[in-house]
Image: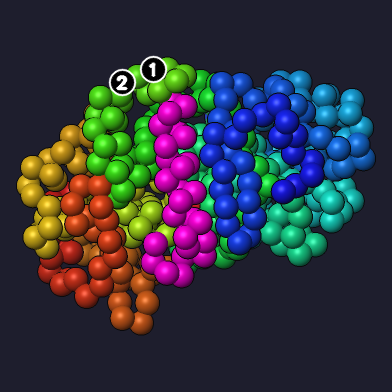
């Protein structure tokens, strides 16, 4: 456990245990302004904070001064907002910033932002000097329930998303619920897509709970929000503990809707017209339709999936052509020499990986949402 985490006064909501490291997830109403309370033994330590144009607002909440007053050296770097930041050129920009500012083996990178900032910062941490400490402070719902936990880091290439990266665990994940208050509603909904994903792939009771509590979540009621995030982090931690590097198939289940969704994102060109979570929402409906076509879930189950997606103010349809989506799916990371592997629903709340699914059925499922 990293010595610089102050665990005495702070109660972890979830603990993630992997071969690559054991670390706490703290979920509190307000963490960023009091970040220094979560750290100790920091005199002389370098902290490099990465954020984007929209999350730089949190830099001025007082925590930098508190860290400096305890003898830490604190520097920050602001990336442009958006998926384009997960690129080779921004990665090089970030690493050059670190090296120019004398980053050392005992430096700590802090990702202060959504999944984009988290993924690129984690990748810099994994590769700088062959690995330095990093902390995730996720500020989107999507990052709080998903991308900040589990150690997947990386950047995009012209051939597809997340094709260059590393499994590299953070030293801690600090979830500040108040940070969500400035998040645009469309981004909040995109995060809800991943929350729904956990329910559909692994916990029918959580699905029922979500159906009852979705309005409270949109009203950002603290205890409800905390419970939803804790539940998702707990489920992700359990999966990652079993299959940190996605080798046994367990972790792949977290990709429910993602093979379809990544294809939609690729066709959209990562330009913000379709958000990751929106693409995943459509992808989950396609996966539900295909699960029904394959005889696993009922038409009522598909309706229930569509209803919760609708209640979460997420899309269920795309304008892209079914054949184009199918072609774009072929480049998916989860494809292997036997072809496409798809995560489908055996029942609501229980997913599994399937290969050799008939192309005709896949196209039919896509066309029900296209
Ligand atoms: N590593 C993983 O396991 C994993 C899992 C899922 C998704 N991802 C990746 O995460 C990325 C998507 O993450 P995202 O949805 O968080 O996108 P994002 O990081 O682009 O954030 C979405 C938008 O919200 C803004 N923003 C962030 N926090 C804010 C706040 N508190 N107030 C106001 N604005 C704020 C950002 O600047 C951005 O414009 C994708 O690149 C996806 O591939 C990674």
Q: In the image, residue 269 lies at what x, y percent?
A: 42, 53
Q: Residue at position x 72%, y 23% from top?
A: 34
Residue 112 or residue 26, whichever sits in front: 26
Q: Quadrant of residue 9?
A: top right
Q: Is residue 66 visible?
A: yes
Secondary structure beneath dot 1 equals loop
> In the image, is residue 239 above or below residue 37?
below
- Please give left or right for residue 178 compared with residue 364 in the image: right
> In the image, is residue 286 above or below residue 186?
below
Kindly check if marks 1 and 2 are in contact, taking CB atoms under 8 A apart as contact: yes
Q: Residue at position x 42%, y 46% from top?
A: 235
Mark 2 residue crowding within 10 angstroms, few (<14) / some (14–19) / many (20+): some
Q: CA distance from mark 1 to mark 2?
A: 6 Å
> In the image, is residue 337 above or below residue 246?
below
Highlighted range, magenta: 225-250
Tag shown at residue 215: 2
Whether 228 is among the magenta residues is: yes
Q: Quadrant of residue 88?
A: bottom right
Tag shown at residue 219: 1
């Amino acid at each position: 456990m990293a010595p610089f985490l102050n665990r005495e006064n702070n109660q972890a909501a979830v603990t993630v245990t992997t071969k690559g490291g054991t670390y706490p997830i703290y979920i509190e109403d307000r963490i960023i302004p009091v970040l220094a309370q979560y750290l100790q033994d920091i005199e002389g330590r370098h902290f490099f904070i990465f954020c984007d144009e929209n999350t730089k607002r949190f830099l001025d909440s007082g925590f930098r001064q508190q860290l400096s007053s305890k003898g830490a050296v604190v520097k920050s770097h602001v990336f442009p907002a958006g998926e384009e930041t997960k690129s080779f050129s921004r990665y090089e920009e970030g690493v050059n910033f670190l090296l120019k500012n004398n980053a050392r083996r005992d430096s700590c990178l802090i990702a202060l932002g959504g999944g984009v900032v988290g993924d690129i910062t984690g990748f810099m941490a994994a590769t700088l000097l062959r690995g330095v400490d990093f902390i995730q402070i996720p500020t989107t719902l999507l990052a709080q329930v998903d991308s900040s936990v589990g150690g997947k880091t990386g950047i995009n290439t012209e051939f597809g998303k997340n094709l260059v990266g590393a499994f590299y665990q953070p030293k801690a994940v600090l979830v500040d619920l108040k940070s969500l208050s400035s998040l645009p509603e469309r981004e909040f909904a995109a995060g809800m897509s991943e929350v729904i994903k956990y329910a559909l792939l692994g916990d029918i009771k959580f699905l029922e709970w979500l159906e009852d509590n979705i309005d409270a979540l949109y009203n950002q009621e603290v205890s409800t929000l905390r419970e939803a995030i804790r539940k998702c982090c707990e489920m992700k931690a359990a999966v990652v503990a079993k299959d940190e590097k996605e080798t046994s198939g367990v972790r792949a289940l977290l990709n429910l809707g993602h093979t379809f969704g990544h294809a939609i994102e690729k066709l959209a060109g990562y330009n913000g017209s379709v958000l990751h979570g929106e693409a995943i929402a459509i992808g989950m409906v396609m996966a539900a339709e295909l699960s029904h076509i394959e005889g696993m879930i009922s038409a009522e189950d598909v309706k229930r999936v569509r209803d919760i997606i609708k209640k979460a103010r997420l899309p269920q349809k795309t304008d892209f052509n079914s054949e184009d989506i199918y072609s774009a799916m072929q480049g998916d990371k989860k494809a292997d020499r036997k072809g496409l592997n798809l995560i489908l629903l055996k029942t609501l709340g229980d997913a599994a990986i399937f290969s050799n699914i008939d192309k005709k059925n896949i196209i039919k499922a896509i066309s029900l949402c296209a």
